[in-house]
Image: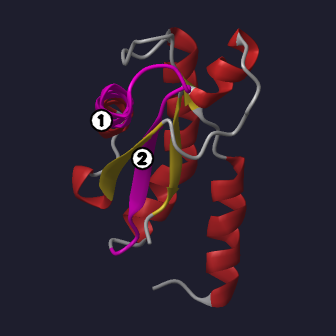
Amino acid sequence: MPDAATRMKIQDLLNQIQDAYFDFARHNLRPDAEATLRANAKTLTEIIQQYPDFHLTVEGYCDERGSDEYNMALGDARAKQAKDYLVTLGLPTAQLKTVSYGKEKQVCSEHDEDCWQKNRRAHLTQAQ
């Protein structure tokens, strides 16, 4: 495992990671989401290659519309789509896991399109 200084550097890098956003009721990656994930991969590749025990979680989220079951499935599809794309960019699949939060853990609570867009995302974080 990395020493304390390296863990701080890793956390700084993780803080720079951006979310990839999706269109309503879709799990395919938009061009802007692909660009975001490419930038994230550049940041993460060095960490992942140096520390084989370091794992990331790709979290899939949805907006508040739709049933719990539908949104859990859609969040899962979004997380898997983002993970698969990261793997094509060189991140090892064994160090990436996925989880769906569906419409739980919203980052915005307004009931309009601007807010819903912020909630339709894939988010990368260090696996716990």
Instruction: Tell which circle, 1 or 2, labels the residue nearer the N-terminal end.
Output: 2
Which residue sits at x=41%, y=55%? 57
Q: Is residue 126 above or below residue 71?
A: below
The reply to whether the C-beta atoms of the residues labelled 1 and 2 are less than 8 Å apart is: yes
The disc placed on residue 80 is 1
| Local secondary structure at mark 1 | helix
Residue 106, x across and y down, in percent:
63, 39
Q: Is residue 110 left or right of residue 19?
A: right
Q: Which quadrant of the figure contains the C terminus?
A: bottom left
For residue 111, what is the image quadrant?
Answer: top right
Which residue sits at x=52%, y=83%? 2
Q: Which quadrant of the figure contains the N terminus?
A: bottom left
Q: Is residue 16 above or below residue 115?
A: below
Q: Name the residue type under label 2.
A: Val
**Label 2 packing within 10 angstroms: few (<14), some (14-19), many (20+):** many
Q: Name the residue type under label 1.
A: Lys
Residue 65, x across and y down, in percent:
51, 20
For residue 28, what is the image quadrant?
Answer: top left
| Local secondary structure at mark 2 | strand
Q: Is residue 31 left or right of residue 113?
A: left
Which residue sits at x=38%, y=26%? 67
* 97 or 71, nearer to the observer: 71
**Label 1 packing within 10 angstroms: few (<14), some (14-19), many (20+):** many
Outermost residue, left side: 94
* 39 or 62, nearer to the observer: 62
Query: Which segment is the magenta one?
Result: 53-79
Task: Residue under label 2, please give it.
Answer: 58
Give the CA separation, mark 1 to mark 2.
8 Å
The disc placed on residue 30 is none
Which residue sits at x=46%, y=52%? 45
